[in-house]
Every structure is written in C-alpha cells, then in structure tokens.
Image (spheres, grey):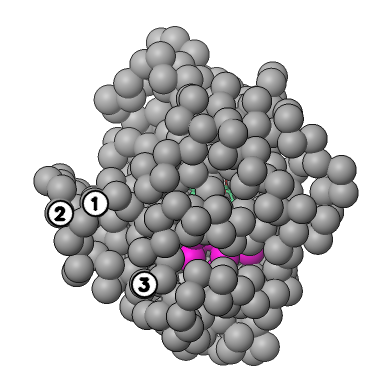
Amino acid sequence: MENFDYCTPTQYVFGRGTEDRVGGLSANCLGNKILLCFGEGSVVRSGLLERVKRSLGAAAVEFIEFGGIQPNPTDDRVYEGIDLCRSHGVTGLLAVGGGSVIDTAKAIAGGVPYRGDFWDFWAGKAVMDRALPVGVVLTIAAAGSEGSGNSVITKIDGAKKVSLRTNVLRPRFSILNPELTMTLPAYQTACGIVDMMAHILERYFSPSADCDVTDRMCEGALKAIVDIAPRVIETPDDYQARANIMWSGTVAHNGICGVGRIEDWTSHAMEHELSAIYGVAHGAGLSVVFPAWIAYVARIKPDKVLQLGSRVFGVSGVDATVGALKNFNRSISMPVTLGELGIDNPDIDLLVRKLHETKGALIGSYCPTDAHASEAIYRLML
Ligand code: NZQ
Ligand code: ZN
C-alpha cells in the first residue's frame, strides 16, 4: 500500500424526498445568492426544477437560473457562468443534473475567484486553491461528479477534453434521491453503469501491490453492479435497484476505491478523445475502450486481469475475462466496437496525436501507454 491522504467532505443526503431539503442545505452551505445550474430540459419536464426553486424560496435563498448545459460540457458556458456570478455577487452554485451540469458548476466555481483564465487550471498552468462552494441534486447515476473533486471540460478551440482533479472542487453536499433517476432512458442508464464500473477499474488496475482491502472493495462494488444492472434496465422504476446503482456510482468515484494505490486512467484519457472528436456519450465510449485496453495490457501484465475474471465474473483466463466484460456491456445494449458506437471511419492517427498532445508521451501507471501502444489499443476497438 502507498501512503495516502483521503478527505471526502461531501455531505451525502440519500433517499426518497431528499430534494425537499435543498433549500436548507443551500442556505447553510452555499450562501444566500446562488447560480442554479441545470441541463437541457429533463429537470424542467420532470418538475424537479420547480420543486428545487420552491425549496430555495422557502429558505430565502436567491437564485439566478443558468440552464441549457449540454452533455460533454464546453468552456464557453463556463466563461458565461463566471461573468454571471461576478456581476450578481453569487455566493455559491447549485447543480441540478448529471456530470455535465455538475462539472460546469465546479469549473465556474473555481473560475470566479481567479483573476486569470479559468482554463489555466485545466492546462496545468495554475493550481486551484479556492472555489465558491458547490451543492448537487443528482439526476443520473454515472459520472460520480457528485462525490469527486473532478471537473471535465472541453475547450472548443482544439476540441480538448480535459479533467481537473482537486479536493477544492468536491461538493459541500450531494442530494441523492434514486427516484429522480427513474425518468432516464435505458441508454443513459446503461452509459452510467459502464462509466461507474470504469471508475472502479481505473483504480483496480494499479502497479501498487498489497492493497487487499481496496481490491476487495472494488470487486464487491463491481459484482454488485453486474448483478443489479439487468434489474434496473428491465424495471426502471424499481426503487431498490435504482438506489443500489446510485450509491455504486458515488462510491465508484469518490476516491474510496483508490486509497493506498496509484491509479491508472488510460481508458478515460482514450475515451475523452473519442467524445471530444466524435461527440459520443462518455459511458458508451468507455464500453468500447475498456475491453480493448484490458485485452492489450493482459498480454504484458495478465495478473490483475485474471484476478478480475475469477473474482468478479467467475471465469478463468484473460480471453474469458475480456469476453465476460464485453458480454456484460452487450447485455445492457452498450457498444463494444467503434462501428457499434457509430464511428465508421475513425481517424486513429488523429486520436493518437491528440491523446499524447493533451496527456503526455506516456499515459497511465499499470502499463504505461506510449503512442505505439495507444494506436494498437484503438485498433483493437475496430
Ligand atoms: O440535459 P438534460 O436534459 O438534463 O438531459 C441529460 C443528458 O442528455 C440526461 N438526463 C440526466 N438526468 C436525467 C436525464 N434524462 C432523463 N431523466 C433524468 N433523470 O442525460 C444526459 C446525459 O447527462 P450528463 O450530465 O452528460 O451525464 P453524465 O452524468 O454521464 O456526465 C457525463 C459527463 O461527465 C464527465 C464525462 O466526460 C461527461 O462530460 N465525467 C465527469 C467526471 C467527474 N466530474 O468526476 C468523471 C467521469 O469519468 C466523466 O469523465
Ligand atoms: Zn468516467
């Protein structure tokens, strides 16, 4: 095990009806004037936004609405939000939605107190040491941004999709009502399931040895997700299934599955290029990338692949493990090739070039990936 320093300050408020507490929590944690961030309309159609506004009103929290945030969120909305916050003297941000809304709120929160360009933090030119407080009402179990210190933003100029991780951006509170996820289309539910499994696998594949507790926690969470996934897809209004999937999504990415070891994150880096260039949903992209990455690293370092196969999928052998992961993804109607993802003529040279321009010559830790390896991995997705 490596040394670690783990702090997760987020207050998780879980269960039915918990969104009614958003006014009180905002008044306590975000101040009296907030930027109310949401997406392209699901929270309007479901009535959630109205309920949130009522609760904020009852707690005397003023809000400025900032809607229309799109999936794979972009820097233009962050600049717009920073200007709005500054001109209205906003004290905190409330994100009502999924990873895209939360990540935009986090980026604005970090940009407001900074004199320079907020992108400096994502470009590695500055270190974020403060941010306005952020609260969350989560509507999709997927990205895990409700518990993470990450914010993933795409710079439109150059289509650069970059993740920043800092404890400063961890939400002050996250309201998790599984009922709010029942309106999700099966496709989005499945994308979320793949993404949360990927967040665990990125931590599971590590060069650090003797992390038995963390390994077993990862395997337990993965097994629970694999077991519950069919139920949540077949019966979208099954509260207990939704509840387990929602909490899995948070546990997968709030850091507890990574303590004591170096993490990998090659597959996420490779997927971020796919969603930056081709606009695919993050989870669907990962459904194609992860089995290909595992198949590649298994040739060099098979041990952890074999452990995953036997402990999570009950199979032996590297091919059987990759096959089991692909079969699982297919069973929830997720793609496993670039063609199935809708990318018929992928520009592999462009993907590889952008990947290493953005993320460096060597990526990841389990089997550090150079341009030769990343090209081979992209080709395994064909
Ligand atoms: O925009 P609306 O109308 O709300 O619709 C959204 C969107 O179209 C819809 N949706 C969300 N909740 C719904 C719903 N539709 C019906 N009922 C509901 N209850 O779902 C669609 C996808 O939403 P989005 O927020 O994009 O999904 P997700 O949570 O998967 O976030 C994806 C983004 O997060 C990044 C991804 O790269 C991507 O940009 N990630 C963020 C991470 C983090 N901050 O820690 C880690 C992840 O690895 C990931 O990279
Ligand atoms: Zn992810």
Numbered mark located on residue 208 in the image = 1
Contact check, label 2 and label 1, Cβ < 8 Å: yes
Q: Secondary structure at mark 2?
A: loop
Pointer 2: what residue?
1
| Amino acid bearing label 2 | Met
Residue 64 on image: x %, y %: 55, 38
Residue interval drawn in magenta: 191-200
Q: Secondary structure at mark 1?
A: loop
Numbered mark located on residue 132 in the image = none
Residue 260 seen from this side: yes
Contact check, label 3 and label 1, Cβ < 8 Å: no
Q: Is residue 83 left or right of residue 114?
A: right
Residue 181 on image: x %, y %: 58, 72
Precedes in sequence: disc 3 or disc 1: 1
Residue 219 on image: x %, y %: 35, 74
Residue shown at the point (50%, 56%) measured from the top left: 299
* Quadrant hosting ligand 1: bottom right
